[in-house]
Image (cartoon, rainbow, N blue to C red):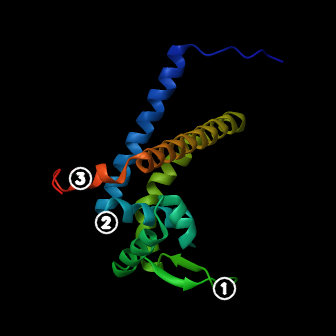
Amino acid sequence: MKAKTRPSAELVERVALALRGVGEQVALLREMIAGHFDLQRTDRMGLDFLYSRGGACTAGELAKATGLTSGSTTALIDRLEKAGYAVREADRQDRRKQIVRIPRKVLADCEAVYEPIRQEMFRLWSSYSAEELELVEEFLTRSTQLHGACVERAGTSRAAERSDRPAGKTQSRSHGGRR
């Protein structure tokens, strides 16, 4: 069995820059898709998540994926529904849940936008061995989990900082220091 060698700081930095580049390209692609569907960022995120889930998910899954509160998720679904990009249906197994679904005609438009990208990526990824892809998958999964944990910690610490502030200080600023 081959011993693992520690990567150089330079290699780790190159990987970090490469991942940042992927993130930037994904953001640009998402903006292009948002423009195609004439959607704002949050609405596009919702449509994108629905599409990635085969065209349907629960409202709770959508809330978790977008990081929105339940009220904001309801507003998102309302906007997608009004624009014709989503419909609500009762969950067949649990009537308390709602399924948010992309209508068939919109799903076809999503396919036209996403499928060429998916095919090109599939060709690239298929050029790697199974072992290489398993390593890439593990790396990306663990990186995503760590990133999510960092985001959660940062949000928790910001919320704690806000709750530690005296209420009067915040209020006096909003009134220009006047009482």
Give the numbered dot on residue 39.
Answer: 2
Give 108 or 36, whichever is nearer the viewer: 36
- The residue type indicated by label 2 comes to Leu
Would you name the residue on which mark 3 appears?
172
Q: Is residue 87 above or below residue 62?
A: below
Give 164 or 64, whichever is nearer the viewer: 164
Q: From mark 3 to mark 2, how far is it between C-alphas?
A: 38 Å
Q: From mark 1 to mark 2, how far is it between C-alphas?
A: 30 Å
Q: Is residue 56 visible?
A: no
- The disc, 1 or 2, on the residue closer to the chain's N-terminal end is 2
Q: Is 132 left or right of 103, judged from the image as shown?
A: right
- The disc, 3 or 2, on the residue closer to the chain's N-terminal end is 2
Would you name the residue on which mark 1 appears?
92
Residue at point 36% right, 75% down?
79
Mark 3 or 2: in front is 3
Q: From mark 3 to mark 1, how far is it between C-alphas?
A: 52 Å
